[in-house]
Image (cartoon, grey):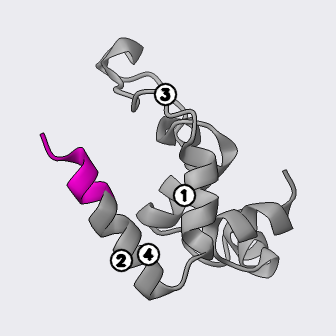
Amino acid sequence: MNQADLGKAIGVTFQQVQKYERGYNRVSASKLWQCAAALGVGIHYFYPVADTPFETADLVSPPPMPHAREMSRLYAALDDGAQRLVLDLARELSRD
């Protein structure tokens, strides 16, 4: 995936992706989560595990979500009003 494609998927320009990559701008937690979804990896992908007092098995990754990448890309392309509608729909559908 190139910088332009990643930018589209997370709702920023490719120039902004370059600034993130070079460290000129910080990446917010929500943008990092969107990047992970767009790239099809877990959020832990961006955090290398060093020698720590806990086991790697203690790291909890979200369950596989086969449609997360496409959903993230499509959601990012929506205007604010449509995003709210999608969020409301997801809340309704997720209720027990």
Q: Decide: is 77 above or below 21.
A: below
Query: Which of the two labelled residues, at mark 3 and mark 1, occupies the earlier sequence position?
Result: 1
Q: Residues within 10 Å of mark 3 (few under 14, many from 20)?
A: few
What whole-number distance in Å separates the C-alpha atoms at marks 2 and 1? 17 Å
SS at mark 3 in the image: loop
Q: Locate residue 61: give its quadrant.
A: top left
What whole-number distance in Å separates the C-alpha atoms at marks 2 and 4? 4 Å
Q: Residue at x 67, y 69 (%)?
A: 20
SS at mark 4 in the image: helix
Label drawn at residue 64: 3
Q: Which kind of residue does numbered mark 2 sit on?
A: Arg
Determine contact: label 3, label 1, CB under 8 Å: no
SS at mark 1 in the image: helix
Residue 22 visible in this rendered orientation of the protein = no
What whole-number distance in Å separates the C-alpha atoms at marks 4 and 1? 14 Å
Query: Which of the two labelled residues, at mark 4 and mark 1, occupies the earlier sequence position?
Result: 1
Q: Residues within 10 Å of mark 2 (few under 14, many from 20)?
A: few
Q: Which kind of residue does numbered mark 3 sit on?
A: Pro
Which residue is at the front of the view, 53 or 14?
14
Query: Which of the two labelled residues, at mark 4 and mark 3, occupies the earlier sequence position?
Result: 3
Q: Which residue is mark 1?
A: 34
Query: Which of the two labelled residues, at mark 2 and mark 1, occupies the earlier sequence position?
Result: 1
Q: Locate residue 19: give its quadrant.
A: bottom right
Q: Which residue is mark 4?
A: 83
The residue segment tinted magenta is 90-96
Q: Which residue is mark 2?
A: 84
Judge depth for marks 2 and 1 and give the one in front: 2
Q: Residue at x 63, y 51 (%)?
A: 70
Q: Which kind of residue does numbered mark 1 sit on?
A: Gln
x and y percentages locating residue 64 in the rendered image = 49, 27
Q: Residue most toward the left?
A: 96
